[in-house]
Image (tube, rainbow, N blue to C red):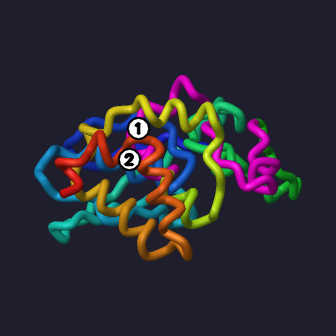
């Protein structure tokens, strides 16, 4: 079930829906004061009703996970980056919910944005496209690639950039696929000074 988390801290409760650990990391990091410490991990514990976030300074923060029964599977899936990450499994009915045809894209080895109008809301998705393409040897769909060429990356901290480059280099059998895509998308030219 999609959920809306609330941080048990002095910061305001989040109102974003959490449908995955990636969104959970984003939610926790946006609710912590900007103290220069990076979120290193977050996970849901206690049967899915609570979680714990770990930061690079060694501190931890707890948060509650509160279900949002009004959110549809399609609304939750629309918040995802790629169609292959917008597939849900219902363990009660043992059926997939795949409103954006992610299973078809998986079979065809295609990376496609779920919602082109929302994809650019998180510029890290451009780098995720690059490392996913290399790790899974997928092709970036044309409309998604065109959009990636227009998204500025100047809002990303070096740690988040390095995390994606590290996955590309260490987890891909052929990192050259991602490096070629980065060149094609203009990522290297746009972020040359920050990548040095």
Q: Is residue 196 visible?
A: yes
Q: Sequence-wise, which precedes: disc 1 or disc 2?
A: 2
Seen in the image, is 153 located left or right of residue 194? right
User: In the drawing, does residue 159 fall left or right of residue 13?
Assistant: left
Q: Residue at x 25, y 58 (%)?
A: 159
Between 88 and 53, the one nearer to me in the picture: 88
The answer to whether residue 4 is above or below residue 55 is: above
Residue 76's image quarter? top right
**Where does residue 26 sit, x and y in percent of width and height?**
38, 47
Q: Quadrant of the C terminus?
A: bottom left
Which segment is the magenta one?
100-129
**Is residue 21 positioned above or below 193 on the image?**
below
As drawn, the label of residue 180 is none
43 is higher (above) or lower (below) than 101: below
Local secondary structure at mark 1: loop
For label 2, the residue is: 26
Give the mark toward the camera: 1 or 2: 1
Q: CA distance from mark 1 to mark 2?
A: 10 Å
Q: Is residue 11 left or right of residue 98?
A: left
Q: Check disc 1 and report the residue beneath it.
A: 122
In magenta segment, residue 119: yes
Point 74% across, 37% down: residue? 100
CB atoms at circles 1 and 2 under 8 Å apart? Answer: yes
Residue 38 magenta-drawn? no
Crowd class of label 1 (few under 14; some 14 to 19; many from 20; radius 10 Å)? some
Q: What secondary structure is found at the residue carrying circle 2?
A: helix
What residue is at 73 percent from the left and 50 percent from the top?
A: 88
Given residues 196 and 113, the one toward you in this image is: 196
Image quadrant in which you'd find residue 117? top right
């Amino acid at each position: 079930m999609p959920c809306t988390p609330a941080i048990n801290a002095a910061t305001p409760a989040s109102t974003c829906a959490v449908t995955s650990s990636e969104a959970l990391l984003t939610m926790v990091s946006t609710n912590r004061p900007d103290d220069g410490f990076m979120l290193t991990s977050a996970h849901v514990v206690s049967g899915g009703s609570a979680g714990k976030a770990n930061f690079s300074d060694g501190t931890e923060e707890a948060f509650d996970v509160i279900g949002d029964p009004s959110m549809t599977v399609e609304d939750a899936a629309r918040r995802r980056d790629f169609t292959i990450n917008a597939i849900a499994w219902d363990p009660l009915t043992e059926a997939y919910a795949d409103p954006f045809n992610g299973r078809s894209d998986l079979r065809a080895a295609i990376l496609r944005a779920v919602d082109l109008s929302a994809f650019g809301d998180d510029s890290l998705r451009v780098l995720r496209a690059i490392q996913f393409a290399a790790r899974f040897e997928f092709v970036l769909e044309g409309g998604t690639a065109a959009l990636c060429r227009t998204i500025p990356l100047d809002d990303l901290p070096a740690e988040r950039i390095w995390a994606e480059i590290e996955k590309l280099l260490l987890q891909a059998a052929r990192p050259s696929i991602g490096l070629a895509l980065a060149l094609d998308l203009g990522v290297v030219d746009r972020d040359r000074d920050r990548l040095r």
